[in-house]
Image: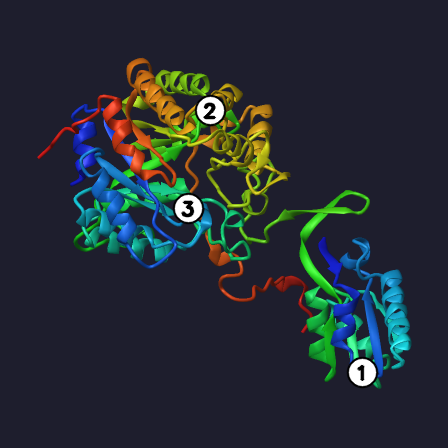
Amino acid sequence: MQTESKLQKLLDSGHFVVTAEIGPPKHASAHGVRHHAEMMRDYVDATNITDCQTAIVRISSIATAVHVKDCGIEPIVQMTCRDRNRIAIQADLLGAYSLGLRNLLCLSGDHQKFGNHPTAKNVYDIDSIQLINAVRKMRDEKVFFCGEPIKEHEPRFFIGAVANPFADPFEFRVARLEKKIEAGAQFIQTQCIFDMERFERFMEMVRERGLHERAHILAGVTPLKSWRAAKYMQTSVSGMIVPEELVQRLKNAEDPKKEGVDICVEQIKYIKENIKGVHGVHIMAIAWEEIVPEIVQRCGLYPRPKVE
Amino acid sequence: MIIAQQKPVKDIAAMIADCKKVAFIGCAGCVAVCLAGGEKETEILASAMRIMRRLEGNPLETVTYLATRQCDPEYVVALDEVVKDVDAIVSLACGVGVQYLAERFDKWVVPALDTKFIGGSVVHGIWEEKCGLCGDCVLHKTGGICPIIRCSKSILNGPCGGSQYGKCEVSKDVDCAWQLIYDRMKKLGKLDKLLEIQPFKDWSKSRDVGPRRATREDVIIE
């Protein structure tokens, strides 16, 4: 299904796309967001705007996406199921579309236990697959989640979902990805890849089921600044596998930041050249947005292609 | 059964700080089985309160009683004599029992327990939540493991991206319900069932329409 998304046009015309992530701030100024957006503008095709990631209160994904769009980058609005019931989700989706936002990434969302309001009541009225499916129906069948017709101006999002090849049960991960595609996901962004071997096995299973032909798969990468960051990811972030060699490589490096960027560049080049079925990369430079242009340049992915 | 746990003694003491005579009413139902509000717990709590108050130089008179069930009017009626001259009633029942006592008596009724969840015992002394009381059971779709209450995100199309080594992202002590569901469905040769996209849940059968009521017309006595 064709939408007005530039990201979709790029992917559909076979370009190896680059997306990055911008985390909204924990205050009411968009100054930093706009700075990051302007810095990334010519280097990425779209940026994810996280939705209160790790359940920490920040400027809303939709409001931030409008700032980012103003700066000339196409945003990908993230929508989690954690904080809103089906009524609030739809109201926000109508609002987002009315503001010119065209890409939507549907997620369940991190549990509130990890955030700054661990005693909050979560919602989880619907789950991510149900969200994907309902957003698709809004667009293709022009109905609200309840089935009532949307008389005019239905939101026509390019629909994305996430996949985590490093969570368990591993064998079921590809089946779940298929379920998301079946529900309506058109592009998939993966969790940060550090264990390339496991990702390759995951992609093998993806290709066996032909899923790479039914949705665009973007591989998630994260440049790490230090061995401590790697260790933290290895031990404290759920659903993540970080090989010990990687931690050691950062530990032994003279300039760990440079090493982190080197590793990320190597990963992107490897994925682009060796792993079939991957249609782009998603760079999650957590609190290190400034590094994105350098990574994109060093990977030979600059300048970015243009579409009408 | 309903699992409840006693509130801290000092919290209970604070609720009846200005009372001279208090009735401690236990319940022989669920809370007795989970060792929170049975006869023994009722006697121990009353005695602890008396000791505390004596040490404070402000003695407390207590009466104790074990109701067969506090969630049935016929057993609450029997308390009329027991509570007639007390300043307050401490209920050692679940939240239902506390409300039944408050409905029947024009007295200050306070809860001694926190009503936790509906579950069962794992080993003696450990209980675990098993049911989300959602009013629309899906256990036939999930291998007999409840995703509503045992998955921390109540995902019907799980597992989420935080499941690792069989554990939930919220704690290494919590089993990932979807890992359990996957393992069980695999064992039963029914993995294909998990590929079906489960529709939105009808939460109107849960508490979202206000208090629910169950009726059995055939057994109602006019």
Mark number, residue A53: 3
Mark number, residue B19: 1
In this view, the residue in front, A158 or B172, is B172
Q: CA distance from mark 3 to mark 1?
A: 49 Å
Q: How is the image coloured?
A: rainbow
Residue A277 in view here? yes
Identity of the amino acid at label 2?
Leu
The number of numbered badges drawn on the structure is: 3
**Residue B220 point in image, percent of width and height:** 66, 67
Q: Label 3 lies in what chain? A: A
User: Which quadrant would the N terminus of chain A be assigned to in this image?
Assistant: top left
Identity of the amino acid at label 1?
Cys
- In the picture as drawn, the residue positioned furthest to the front comes out as A254
In this view, the residue in front, B4 or A291, is A291
Q: Label 1 lies in what chain? A: B
Q: CA distance from mark 1 to mark 2?
A: 66 Å
Res. B123 image quadrant: top right
- Label 2: state its secondary structure: helix
Q: Does B220 sit above or below residue A271? A: below
The answer to whether dots 2 and 3 both sit on one chain is yes
**Residue B187 point in image, percent of width and height:** 60, 24
In this view, the residue in front, B214 or B49, is B49
**Residue A68 point in image, percent of width and height:** 23, 47
State which mark lies toward you, 1 or 2. 2
